[in-house]
Image (cartoon, rainbow, N blue to C red):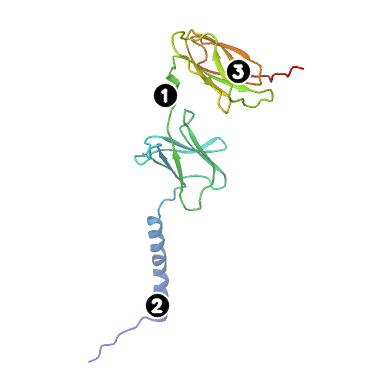
Amino acid sequence: MFLSIRRPSFTKTIELFFAMAPVVLLAPMQASGQGQAEYCAFEVVVNSPDGKPVVGADAVLTRDGGTVGTAVTNEGGVARICDAPSDALLDVEVGGKLCGAVAVRHLKTYWMRTRRVYITYLGCHGEVWWIPGGCEFTIRTRDQRGAPLGGVVFQERQPQDPQGEQPERISDRFGRVFLFLAYGRTFAASLQKPGYAVKVITGDCQVGGETAREVTTVLEEERESH
């Protein structure tokens, strides 16, 4: 006894294929959408000068001075700013407007590839509260053409401590002489260099005044007598 097997007609086969086609095509698309890794435009890696990660630092992405995105560094010192325009040059800033702030300028995003920006950062905003206890003078000696004049001897006429030995101060190759003056004190000194006329300068340090002082003085060449 033989059993007869009915084969589906050609028309039925075509109908079945088209009925299953949306399911077959949709499955890979759904899987692809679920498995796609998030593209992140920037990772800002912030370390201290000794190479340790800086945790909790604010990283800001800006465009023409306007903020595009922000993030805070994690325990590894990494801040991720994922959404960024691809048609402009961008800046990465760490430290805001405080002392020690760092900026990396004119960056473009990479197409579908994360751009890593490496920054060494040491905040120094606490220095605003540091008081030196006097005035820090930077005296700059120049010739008549405005060029730095090295080898100028700075000789105090009224030493701050008559009993102590006064250190010899000579201007360096940048024409600089450094002098610290305690509050309430004054100084008078002559500047001497062979071939130049001696010049006397004075200064004082008052409480409440500027502690960082820049003084520029010009020495004139001596005229030969006939």
Mark 3 or mark 2, earlier in chain: 2
Secondary structure type for disc 3: strand
x and y percent of residue 210 in the render? 52, 15
- Residue highlighted by disc 3: 192
Mark 1 or mark 2, earlier in chain: 2
- Return the residue found at the far right: 226
- Residue highlighted by disc 2: 13
Label 3 – label 1 distance at C-alpha = 40 Å
Asked if residue 8 is positioned above or below residue 215 in the image, the reply reads below
- Residue highlighted by disc 1: 126
Q: Residue drawn at (41%, 34%), measured in percent from left and top? A: 57
Left or right: 91 with respect to 123? right
x and y percent of residue 121 in the render? 43, 35
Q: Residue drawn at (45%, 21%), measured in percent from left and top? A: 128
Crowding at label 3, few (<14), some or many (≥20) Cα neighbours within 10 Å?
Answer: some
Left or right: 200 with respect to 27? right
Q: Nearer the viewer, mark 3 or mark 1?
A: 3
- The kind of residue tagged 3 is Gln
Asked if residue 204 is positioned above or below residue 193 in the image, the reply reads above
Asked if residue 204 is positioned above or below residue 76 in the image, the reply reads above
- Return the residue found at the far front: 226
Place residue 225 in its image quadrant: top right
Quarter of the rendering occupied by the C terminus: top right
> What label sits on residue 24 in the rendered view?
none
